[in-house]
Amino acid sequence: RAKQTGRGCHRIFEAEMEQVFQMRRLLEQDLRKALIADEFLVHYQPVMDIAHGRITGVEALLRWESPSRGRVSPADFIPFAEEVGLMAEIGDWVLRTACRDALAWPEDMTISVNLSPTQFRRGELAERVAMALAHSGLPATRLELEVTETAMIDDIDHATSILNELRALGVRVALDDFGTGYSSLSFLRNLPFNRIKIDRSFVQDLGVKPEATAIVRAVTAMCHSLNVAVTAEGVETKHQIRLLEEQGCPEVQGFLISRPCPASEVLAWLGKSAERLEGCGLTRFSA
Ligand code: C2E
Ligand code: MG
Ligand code: MG
Ligand code: MG
């Protein structure tokens, strides 16, 4: 009896595994098609300098409009695309698209592009970046690349040399989702970042958990003394922006300032500075 039950379980397990494999095969096929059929888009989310109410740049965020699946979140398909080896190609496409789109925007605006761990570790990253810049004609100083700790944790020496190669091109590098990894402080001490991005989870806790405020203040102060720029991610309320300003955080990004939007809407949005500042509770600049 026990044996039979065991075998039954085994069969059910096999059937479920088969289903999982089947779903993954389909997703992989769909992703390959998406690249060819032009189903990927890049949206852009502005970054604002709080002290001057100025937009300093935008972050490129990948979108997938699948005819069969609808709009798929990057958080759902990027890890899979990484696993099946498609993220390098998708990432190159994002980089080229972002560099080209950025040419339409003011020259003092930076464009930030996220790099996945495999994109970061794969050889020839600097060459690929240099190529995207050369093809578009975008000056290297306008490009910033965002990397997470996960991409660098396994081999700090290798990560350091990649970051140095990128910086030698004149490109800036940012540490994304700061505070969510395990070795944040040693990262800051050892790696040549130009900016850190304080993760949204800390911003969410501002004014709710006293530790969050203390952490944001400490991180901001540390970055100032290390001469590293700071951006807070995921700002959704006027209260949060005020608390960030009080803690000395110079730049913010989040739904309060703007949701990510298509390239074609960025210029019009930049023009509406009074409405924009009013929406953030920063009316002092609009006079
Ligand atoms: P990220 O780089 O940390 O990007 C910020 C994410 O937070 C974006 O999600 C953005 O839409 C979202 N966000 C911005 N402001 C707010 C806010 O006020 N509230 C909330 N709740 N969320 C906000 P998105 O676009 O879904 O991207 C998720 C992640 O996927 C990104 O996190 C990044 O790690 C990755 N990703 C996106 N595009 C690319 C890409 O082109 N290449 C690579 N390698 N990764 C990408
Ligand atoms: Mg990012
Ligand atoms: Mg982030
Ligand atoms: Mg993130």
Image (tube, rainbow, N blue to C red):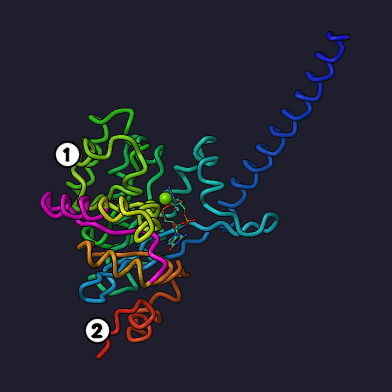
Among the 4 quarters of the image, the one containing residue 57? bottom left
* CA separation in Å, label 1 and label 2: 36 Å
Q: Residues within 10 Å of mark 1 (few under 14, many from 20)?
A: few
- Disc tally is 2
Residue on which the image places disc 2: 285
The residue that appears at 64% across and 47% down in the rendered structure is: 30
Please, is residue 257 above or below residue 215 in the view?
below
Residue on which the image places disc 1: 189
Q: Nearer the viewer, residue 75 or 281?
A: 281
Left or right: 172 with respect to 6? left
Range shown magenta: 216-237
Q: Is residue 95 visible?
A: no
The residue that appears at 23% across and 45% down in the rendered structure is: 166
Please name the amino acid that badge 1 sits on: Arg
Residue 265 among those drawn in magenta: no
Query: Residue 115: horizontal and vertical position, in percent?
Result: 38, 46
Q: Secondary structure at mark 2?
A: helix
Please name the amino acid that badge 2 sits on: Phe
